[in-house]
Image (spheres, rainbow, N blue to C red):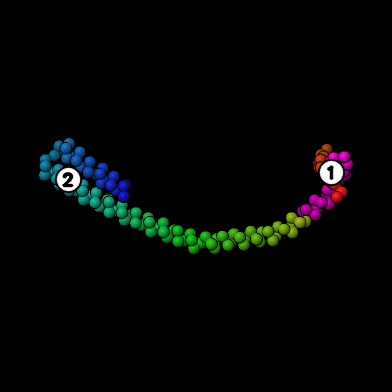
Amino acid sequence: MGFFKGILFGAGLGTLGGLLLAPRKGEETREKLITNTRELVVLTDELNDNLTAFRESATNLKNTFDTLAPAFKSGVEKDLEEFRFQADPRIQQIQAQLEKINQSLPQTQTADTTVIKKGRFSLTRPAETGE
């Protein structure tokens, strides 16, 4: 409500300033004042109507979101589960192939670490304990 009070207060000050500084006759000034006041009332009514329409639109948007969000969420969860279902066997195959590759690489054993050399690259790992 503070916004509307500010609008009305500003309109009142503008009207008072217009009356004090008006170069017209009293009758013309009154007619102009009545016309401006009517225009202000019409603009205020239009603003209230637009705000009401905006509130209704926001409520409709929220209701639409509340209706669609669960379906969207379940769709995403279904797609994610399907992706996992398809990806898990592939991940297992990749891990098995990686294990085969690691086993086929030449290894150099030192006291603390295992060094795997392949070409100009080497991978140093902590030594495995035989527990």
Among the two numbered marks 1 and 2 on one chain, the one whose residue lies closer to the N terminus: 2
Expressed as whole percent of the image width and height from the top left, the position of residue 71 reads 54, 63
Q: Is residue 2 left or right of residue 94?
A: left
Image x and y of residue 32, in percent: 17, 45
Position above or below: 53 against 13: below
Q: Quadrant of residue 112?
A: top right
Please report the bounds of the magenta region as a residue range.
94-118
Identify the amino acid type marked 1. Ala
* Residue at position x 41%, y 56% in the image: 58
Quarter residue 63 falls in = bottom left
- SS for callout 1: loop
* Front disc: 1 or 2: 1
In the figure, residue 57 lies in which quadrant?
A: bottom left
Q: Is residue 3 magenta?
A: no
Instruction: Check disc 2 and give the amino acid type.
Output: Lys
Q: Is residue 114 magenta?
A: yes
